Image (cartoon, rainbow, N blue to C red):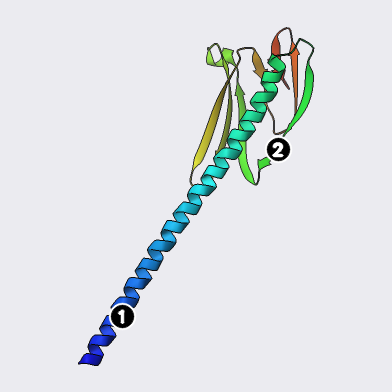
Amino acid sequence: MKKAQSSVEVALLIGFMFLAFNVFLLVIAQRMVGVQEQKDRALIEDMSSVIEGEIELAVGVEDGYSRTFQIPQTLKGINYSVKLINSTTMKTNYSELVLKYVNFTKSYETVKKLPKNVDGIIYKGENNIVKKDGIICLNICS
């Protein structure tokens, strides 16, 4: 009878250890997903800050300013979208820059407020920014 009891105790111990190991792996996996999401958000935030910086530079200079800058197709393999919404479309006194990425399970969006006089379309790849008559034009102005 003692051998049967020992076998049951060993089986219970192995089952408990297996359960504890699986919980540990689940916690580690959750932590890794959270860290990756933070990195992805930081990439999107950084790219929006770069674009915002290009626009603010154009706002601060005189008419006639022209510059070409690049926006990558992906951010370290992350696909994203970039959109400029001008103030007349929104009927506000500011324009907005919207960057959004959609991961397998989650999406994240960052919005930057820009001056009212910013208009045009932002593309992935090469972008031209021009200041003419106090209006900042990105690629094509309406």
C-alpha distance separating marks 1 and 2: 56 Å
Q: In the figure, 55 relative to 62: above or below?
A: below
Residue on which the image places disc 1: 11
Residue placed most toward the observer, 117 or 104:
117
In this picture, residue 123 sits left or right of residue 95: right
Determine which quarter of the picture holds residue 68.
top right
Are the residues tagged 1 and 2 within 8 Å (C-beta)? no
Quarter of the image where the N terminus is located: bottom left
Q: In the figure, 101 relative to 1: above or below?
A: above
Quarter of the image where the C terminus is located: top right
How many marks overall? 2
Q: Residue furthest top?
A: 133
Amino acid marked by disc 2: Pro
Where is residue 96 drawn, in percent x and y?
57, 21
Q: Residue at x 46, y 58 (%)?
A: 28
> Which element is circle 2 on?
loop
Q: Residue at x 58, y 14 (%)?
A: 87
Please indicate, yes or no, whether residue 141 appears anywhere in the rendered image: no
Amino acid marked by disc 1: Ala
Please indicate, yes or no, whether residue 87 appears anywhere in the rendered image: yes
The circle on residue 47 is none
Where is residue 76 drawn, in percent x and y?
65, 45
Residue on which the image places disc 2: 72
Where is residue 114 drawn, in percent x and y?
60, 18
Please tell me which of labels 1 and 2 falls first in the chain: 1
Q: In the figure, 117 relative to 5: above or below?
A: above
In this picture, residue 106 sits left or right of residue 46: left
